[in-house]
């Protein structure tokens, strides 16, 4: 039976990972691993077998050989990991699931902890961390919604992530925060031009929305595009005296981003992934993190159809197969 919702605390899931049969049932309930496979040759249901760390479906059906007094067993088998997040990795599912649990619940810096606790190399940890962020990116794209509407207030603000020195280096992002629902978005932008801002706002915020922003001149076009705009001059005040407008929520969001994303070992080219990780963990209750992550992984990397045949070693695989 598919799992619609479940609560998993950090220590309880780590303990579950050590009970292989229960872990497999959990992964099957979340559709990360297939629960059943029918043999494409004889259409009989295959038997799930564990061969060490290998998980396979084997057809054990026997049939008579025509014109001979012999029976023959169907020799079809397929990896249960085929097409899933485990496909192509040399790690066992216990280690991978424990890593995912640490990655979802642990705080920075965590690499040294993972190296010592899970006996994984730094290269493997980096690869799996990037892979998990890709799942977060895809998850957020699946649940993304347009903010605002008549009578709804959305705060917007841009921010740069990067290094400040003699020369500013980094990447600009535009964020939006809906006050009533606390829904939000953060998207990368190539520049701070009015055309770029307007393109993002049109795609992310509904007409008729009340938008609160700072006094950056690129926002001046919003009133002409079906939005009600109020501005706050942060150089003078946090709350505009004449309108009561403020952008405290979006300002707090950017403070949280800077506080939650580690500055150590961070690569600016991976900033979209770091932000996706931040938004995923912010949008999901801690007790549901593992459930939502596994369901997202199952949607993005569903088990492959056994009729396609056994995996081709030359084909690209979903998991970070370039490392042990």
Image: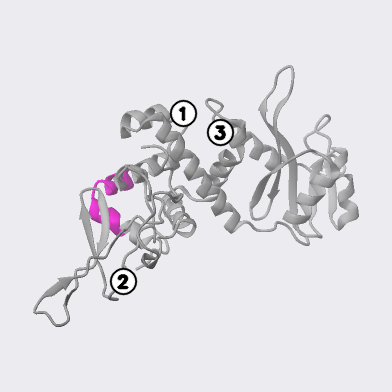
Give me the disc on residue 250.
none
Q: Is residue 20 magenta?
A: yes
Residue 162 higher or lower than 308, as above or below: above
Q: Which residue is mark 1?
A: 109
Q: Residue furthest bottom?
A: 67
Magenta residues? Answer: 11-25
- State the image coordinates of residue 247 (x, y, percent, origin top left): 74, 41
Residue pointed to by mark 3: 261
- Secondary structure of the residue carrying tag 3 is loop
Q: CA distance from mark 1 to mark 2?
A: 45 Å
- Badge 2 density bin: few <14, some 14–19, many ≥20, Cα 10 Å: some
Q: Earlier in the sequence, mark 3 or mark 2?
A: 2
The rendered magenta stretch, by its main secondary structure, is classed as helix
**Mark 3–mark 2 distance (CA, rounded to whole Å):** 45 Å
In the picture of the structure, the residue carrying the numbered disc 2 is 38
What residue is shown at x 48% (from left), y 59% (from top)? 299
Question: Quick one: 93 or 287, which is closer to the camera?
Answer: 93
Q: Secondary structure at mark 2?
A: loop
Q: Earlier in the sequence, mark 1 or mark 3?
A: 1
């Amino acid at each position: 039976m598919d799992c619609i919702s479940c609560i998993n605390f950090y220590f309880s899931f780590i303990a579950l990972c050590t009970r292989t049969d229960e872990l497999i049932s959990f992964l099957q309930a979340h559709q990360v691993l297939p629960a059943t496979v029918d043999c494409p040759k004889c259409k009989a249901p295959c038997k799930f077998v564990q061969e060490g760390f290998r998980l396979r479906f084997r057809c054990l059906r026997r049939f008579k050989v025509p014109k001979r007094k012999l029976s023959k067993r169907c020799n079809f088998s397929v990896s249960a990991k085929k097409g899933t997040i485990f496909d192509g990795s040399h790690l066992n599912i216990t280690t991978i699931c424990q890593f995912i649990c640490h990655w979802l619940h642990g705080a920075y810096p965590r690499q040294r902890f993972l190296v010592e606790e899970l006996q994984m190399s730094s290269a493997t940890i980096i690869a799996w961390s990037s892979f998990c962020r890709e799942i977060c990116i895809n998850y957020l794209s699946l649940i993304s919604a347009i903010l605002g509407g008549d009578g709804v207030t959305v705060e917007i603000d841009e921010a740069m992530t990067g290094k400040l020195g003699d020369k500013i280096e980094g990447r600009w992002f535009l964020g939006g925060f809906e006050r009533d629902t606390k829904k939000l978005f953060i998207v990368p932008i190539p520049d701070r031009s009015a055309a770029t801002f307007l393109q993002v706002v049109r795609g992310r915020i509904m007409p008729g929305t009340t938008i609160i922003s700072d006094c950056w001149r690129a926002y001046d076009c919003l009133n002409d595009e079906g939005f009600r705009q109020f501005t706050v001059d942060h150089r003078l005040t946090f709350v505009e005296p004449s309108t009561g407008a403020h952008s405290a929520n979006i300002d707090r969001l950017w403070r949280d981003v800077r506080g939650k994303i580690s500055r150590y070992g961070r690569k600016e080219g991976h900033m979209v992934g770091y932000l996706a990780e931040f938004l995923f963990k912010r949008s999901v209750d801690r007790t549901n993190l593992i459930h939502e992550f596994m369901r997202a992984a199952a949607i993005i990397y569903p088990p492959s159809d056994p009729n396609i045949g056994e995996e081709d070693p030359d084909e690209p695989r979903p998991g970070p197969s370039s490392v042990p």
